[in-house]
Amino acid sequence: MLIAGNWKMNLKYEDIIKLKNIISDLEVDRRVEIAIFPQFPLLYSAIEKLSDYKIEVGAQACSSVLKGAFTGDVSVEIISDIGCKYCIVGHSERREYHHETNQFVKNASNLLLSKNIIPIVCVGESLEVKNKRETNQFIKSQIRECIPENITSNIVVAYEPIWAIGTGKIPEYEEISSVHKIIMNELSHIKNLKVIYGGSVNKENCSKIFELNEVHGALIGGASLKFKDFLAIYESAVKQII
Ligand code: PGA
């Protein structure tokens, strides 16, 4: 399982130190990996401070090209050089505010894999698509358009319904299972595929989500900013696999 904390544009250097102090007494169960995704300028310090505690660090986004005149963008080369294991690609906020398309996600995923970084590819339907009962078809085409055809291992897909992000609402548990099954069927050729759920995961609803066989972890926004809650979610994942 993978418990990933997407800090978005929140928290500071001092919070990395706080997290380090909190987790120094935690016994990390290797079967459940913890990863955090701070803002770019904090990545290096996070890796330096947290690697002894078996917490992985990843980037929230990346460019879809390796280098050039792209002011403000960040290359996967740098993300790889500093030692990130993961990078989130195609988060719905990037799709909305930075116009990242499915083709962008595919190109970026290819680049990440070429630099040995595991992409966490986000997919998920809007409320409009959900209300039209077109979720399954929508997710299938997102998967086909976002995941490079030649990939055979090392990718994480995060199913994040857009209407569930930051709203406190989550799909019915059966709906989560059924969308995860669709993703797993579409990508059955990929070894070690993880399909994680994201969107309003909290310490109250996580254990029911982790009970679902098709859920291999969570991408957590709001609740990852409160470290006690984040670690409670991690412990709930550990309980699930024991
Ligand atoms: P949330 O965000 O947990 O605050 O809903 C999840 C995400 O955007 O990845």
Image (spheres, helix red, strand yellow):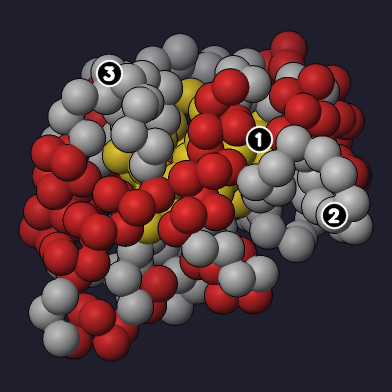
> Label 1: few (<14), some or many (≥20) within 10 Å?
many
On screen, 142 above or below 152?
below
Q: CA distance from mark 3 to mark 2?
A: 34 Å
Residue 184 lies in what quarter of the image? top left
Q: Residue at x 41, y 22 (%)?
A: 154
Check if mark 2's residue and mark 1's residue have beta carbons within 8 Å. Answer: no
Look at discs 3 and 2 and give the one toward the viewer.
2
| Residue 70 at x, y percent in the picture | 85, 54
Disc 2: residue Cβ within 8 A of ligand 1's nearest atom = no
Residue 37 lies in what quarter of the image? top right
> Label 3: few (<14), some or many (≥20) within 10 Å?
few
| Residue 221 at x, y percent in the picture | 55, 58
Does residue 239 appear in the picture of this structure? no
Q: Earlier in the sequence, mark 3 or mark 2?
A: 2
- Of the residues shown, which amino acid type is indicated by label 1? Gly
Q: CA distance from mark 2 to mark 1?
A: 21 Å
* Circle 3 residue: 191
**In front: 4, or 155?**
155
Check if mark 3's residue and mark 1's residue have beta carbons within 8 Å. Answer: no
> Label 2: few (<14), some or many (≥20) within 10 Å?
few
| Residue 151 at x, y percent in the picture | 37, 26
* Circle 2 residue: 70
